[in-house]
Amino acid sequence: MKDWVLALLVLLPEILIFYRKVIFSPHYVIPWDFRYYHLPLTTFIASSWRAGQFPLWDPYTYCGLPFFANINAQIFYPPTAVTVFFANFFSPDRLTYFMELHLAAHVLLGGVFTFLLLGEIGASRGAALIGATIFQCGPYFASQTQHLGAIDGAAWIPLACWSVVRLAKRPSPRWTGVLALSLALSILAGFPSTGAAAFLCVFVLAAALIVFQKSSLKLLLCCAAASALAALLSAVQLLPTLQASSLSVSKFRGDFRGTSWGVPWQAFASMVWPDFYHVFELNLYKLPWNPTFLYLYCGIPALLFIVVAVVRRSPYVAAFGSLTVVAFFWMMGTHTLPGRLFFPFFFDLVHDSVYVEFTMVVFSLGIAVLAGLGANSLLRRPLLLGAVLVITFLDLMFAGSGKIMNATSVDAEPGISYSQFGGSRELMDWIRQRLYQSSPPARFDLYNDFTGWVTTTPITRLPSANGNDPFALYRLMQVRLLFCNGERWGRFYQVTRPDSPILDLLNVRLLLSMSAVPENLKFVKAVDLPGRAIYENGAPLPRFFLVPNIVRAEDMADAVRQLGSPSFDPAKVAVVEQGTAAHFPDGADAVVRIVEYSPSQVRLQVESIQPRYLVSSEVNYPGWRAFIDGQERPISMTDVAFRGLPVPAGNHEVVFRFWPTILLWSASVSALACLALAWLVFASLWHN
């Protein structure tokens, strides 16, 4: 029997049992970020594909957001494409379930690759199955289930380690290519912290194999070549993401760093007592850290096998022990003395885009491999290995399966769907009816309400001027700070000044709140519905309108100052950072009709006796182009963050179209890298 077939026959039932609640019961789903962040992103991909469109631009969030540049969306991650295809083909309404199967399949993939890795370093099949069980049912996958990209990226790390071990034995183009592919997939999976952990794992393991297994220095050259190829393979996502990062609040992550990062020392109590700090009962949990990082339970058998492996000095124990120790200190971050000295410089280097806690995946893998080596050294009889395998799985299953971090009840928390919020259809129907009085619909915002409203807009299709995304565009957030309180690095601000004229500019018709909004002339209470009050603005400006006056701004700061002036009237004045100031004759002769509105293209019919300036509340971003009667015209940065341009008198067709050239260049780089990968992998096969 093929080794991988045996692995599937044993490890697949473990996955089905461990994730039985979300796989077999419609009453449970994966909680938190999976529902309120990853599901909306994948929903937008799925709906775009059904409409025959590529998901380039999200029109529902923040007055528009470059969706293709969001690495968390996994647009260019091949397994996501497969998942969305099958969901769209079989049952679009069950996308959540297909995503849960996608996640479970990746956990299984991580287990199978761990099994093959252990076989490569000399473990018996039974011992390799024990190590694989510890990894796939252990602390990382059990506690971080909500982070889809973190799970997907982690699945490829054992394959990367397997490749490094093969290259340590004999450098070859084929395994260099496999290593490059595994690293590229860990990047494209969409969670930079896990991708960084994969690279750390590869180079630490390679160095350890050179020292302890007497491998050649060529191993580091192979790892460096594979890393470079992985970066090129991932260019289709990396280059747009880097561009978006430079234009978003993510460049200011260091502003809110604080002094404590990493897994705290208290977490290690969970290695013998899983719920020591009540991480499964959040009403009793009292510590200041994220409770999911305080679950490190890898099983009592694993700890015993590690001791055996170390005492008996099993082959490869020194190499993987070194990897585990480095991962231990890395994931601890600033909670150790070396970490307090090193990590401030590291965070500055990576602009705080890497969360060291997620190096837990390498620590968990190291524990699993060491335990597998210990089981191989101690247990020889197949029957005994089988019994210990069952005990190991049951120990991990009872400790971590079906807990609050990997399964939540839909009955207790209905969540948000297209038709209901928290179980209330009346609330969703009322909001949709009010916003869809115009086409495209008006936007909503939040005064004191649940952030899930603005992270799930691709699901509800209720456009918002707000959002909660790490790639929130800096210019748009500067506009929001004119009527919100917050820091420059913030990505989610609730309205604090509902009387601001900027809310008119942003086409905000409704304000949702769980508490009373102070009386003002703009927003009037429209209805009280279960759990919240909704306030309505009777006359927000449309998405596209014409103004007679142009005021020049020297730069963004000057534009923000002018928008914040008490005299600013967005219906009469456009603040423009390019071009010259102008004043056209007044008159109510201007009409803008929206002929077509789609995420990546807007077609307008503009009629005016006098020249006017066309203002939109649609965010401007590199890649947007404008055409008047088929002739391309430059888009000016208008009112700090939005698209605008002068329109001559008469009847004209104005088209805004989004096609970012950076995507063409980055895709070309990745395509060439794919050819290089194919040559590395298949040329050696043909030669053999």
Image (cartoon, rainbow, N blue to C red):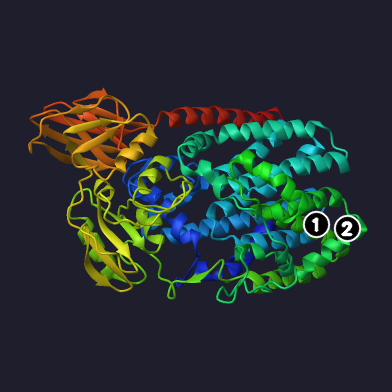
Eyeballing the image, is 527 above or below 314? below
Image check: 378 left or right of 401?
right
Spatial distance from mark 2 to mark 1, Cα to Cα?
8 Å
Eyeballing the image, is 205 above or below 683? below
Q: Nearer the viewer, residue 127 or 651?
A: 651
The quadrant in which residue 680 appears is top right
**Which residue, as the protein is rendered here, is positioned at the far right?**
312
Eyeballing the image, is 247 above or below 87? above
Q: Is residue 171 visible?
A: no
Image check: 571 left or right of 513?
left
Whole-percent x, y for residue 328 in the image? 75, 54
Whole-percent x, y for residue 461 in the image? 31, 54
Could you tell me how many numbered marks the image carries?
2
Q: Nearer the viewer, residue 683 or 441?
A: 441
Q: Secondary structure at mark 1?
A: helix
Q: Is residue 653 visible?
A: yes
Dot 1 amino acid type: Leu
Image check: 233 left or right of 594?
right
**Which residue, as the protein is rendered here, is positioned at the far front?**
566
* Quadrant into which the C terminus falls: top right
Q: Which residue is mark 2?
A: 310
Q: Secondary structure at mark 2?
A: helix
Q: Which residue is mark 1?
A: 370
Whole-percent x, y for residue 75 in the image? 46, 44
| Residue at 46 percent of width and 38 percent of height | 244
Dot 2 amino acid type: Val
Marks 2 & 1, CB-CB < 8 Å contact: yes
Q: Residues within 10 Å of mark 2 (few under 14, many from 20)?
A: some
